[in-house]
Image (cartoon, rainbow, N blue to C red):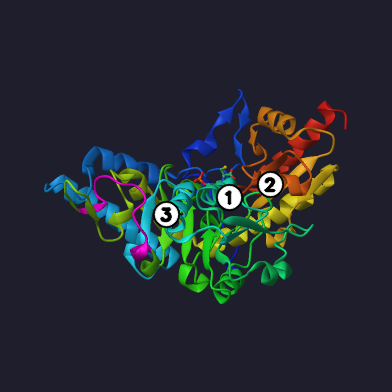
Amino acid sequence: MASTDAPPLDANRYRQDFPILSSVLHGDQPLVYLDNAATTQRPRCVIEKIVEVYERQYANVHRGIHWLSDQSTDLFEEAREKTRRFINAPLREEVIFTTGATGAINLVARSWGDANLQAGDEILVTEMEHHSNLVPWHQLAERSGCRVKFIPITDEGRLDLEQLPALLTEKTKLVAFTAVSNVLGTINPVVEIVEQAHQAGALALVDAAQSAPHGRNDVQAWNADFVAFSGHKMLAPSGVGILYGRASLLDAMPPFLGGGSMIHRVTMDGFEPAELPAKFEAGTPPIVSAIGLGAAIDYLEDIGVDNIHHYAQMLTQQAHDVLEEVGGVRFFGPPPAEKAGIVSFTLEGIHAHDVAQILDQYGVAIRAGHHCAMPLHKRLGVAASNRASFYFYNTPEEIDALADGLRAAKRVFRR
Ligand code: C6P
């Protein structure tokens, strides 16, 4: 994710595009939405695109030999092409629509994993993984007898890459890691890790769920074998995500789900799978959500992904500064300049859920809990944390509102 000297973007201008951001909660509290790592909000252009498709261009894709189906298919494939460009994938066949990052990673674990891994093999993940990039590998280990090993993190919340050479052995078949931690905000050195995985003869899967909304995700520059992300974290409707896979790998992999669309021919005795990408898109796909993802990508590219990254980092720095002044805040993860819009913390002596509940009374929405990263929280020595996560439509005033809410929580609990 490149950082540029682009001028700060005008968040207030973009806010006008998001109807939900003018909500007023509990009678008189303006919504302060700081839960963007869980899911972002949708701009009017995405909402209007969805309505337009349902009102005028909706039919099932690929099947119908009728005008409406052609319309719908064209829009669906256009969205695939926009996504291909967004991640700089060489081929449209390498862009598979899934249900989300979770669906994409499970696809790889079930299809590539079941076909290629056996007892004695190893998969390397990291201590900062979301459960979606952990449980599918544990499940694969249960099925195949392979082993899941962990790249540890340092006390500063970075990956301890000094350990990587020793962890990579001839048994390692896959290194599956997140580009950005959904808890620590850490931006990981993707190119370096992929390169080391390849040198050891392993493949590399990048979980880009948190990086896709926040900057450049160039699968060719990364040289990644698989990349997974979700539409709903980057302004698109929920229910759609992407698996990028190197064509040579996807070609060799057996289909994951069976059903309509993914076949070339079916007989009483069996079936022949379709070509890519259909082979991995069984059943009716998330048609309108995918088209909405295309509209979201247009909108993000208009703002500029580097500008978004730069701006979120500025808010992250501000959040560290003002929360520091609140007192009693323990931050997790590296310094703000190394984070992608995510600030996790605990407030001394107050449970994370209580903090979030009090903030909610002030209209401030953050996440509290383990954020689907229980092994990481164990490593951090806490059961739960609070997480504020920013996007380009958040303002410095909203970060101040977060700090005010935390002061209120301290007053309530007399800390
Ligand atoms: N993290 C969060 O609040 P899905 O649910 O499939 O869209 O994305 C899963 C996922 C995978 N990897 C990372 C790094 C993620 O952050 C997420 C989703 C949300 O942190 C919801 S738990």
Q: Per the image, is 134 magenta?
A: no
Q: Is residue 188 left or right of residue 64?
A: right
The residue tagged 1 is 134
Q: In this view, does 400 lie to the left or right of 85?
A: right
Q: Which numbered disc, 2 or 1, marks the residue that appears first in the sequence?
A: 1
Q: Residue at x 35, y 49 (%)?
A: 290
Element assignment for label 3: strand
Q: Residue at x 74, y 33 (%)?
A: 355
The residue tagged 3 is 242
Amino acid type at mark 3: Ile
Which is nearer the eye, 378 or 388? 378
Measuring from the top left, give residue 385's x and y in whole percent. Answer: 72, 41
Nearest to viewer (mark 3 / mark 1): 1
Mark 2, other Cα within 10 Å: few <14 / some 14–19 / many ≥20: some
Measuring from the top left, give residue 48's x and y in whole percent. Answer: 35, 42
Element assignment for label 1: loop
Q: Per the image, is 261 magenta?
A: yes
Amino acid type at mark 1: Leu
Q: In this view, does 162 lie to the left or right of 340?
A: right
Quadrant (top left, top right, bottom left, bottom right) of the C terminus? top right
Residues drawn in magenta: 250-264
Query: In 3D space, how far apart are the residues under numbered discs 3 and 1 (Cα atoms)?
Result: 18 Å
Q: Residue at x 50, y 48 (%)?
A: 143
Q: Which numbered disc, 2 or 3, marks the residue that appears first in the sequence?
A: 3
The residue tagged 2 is 375
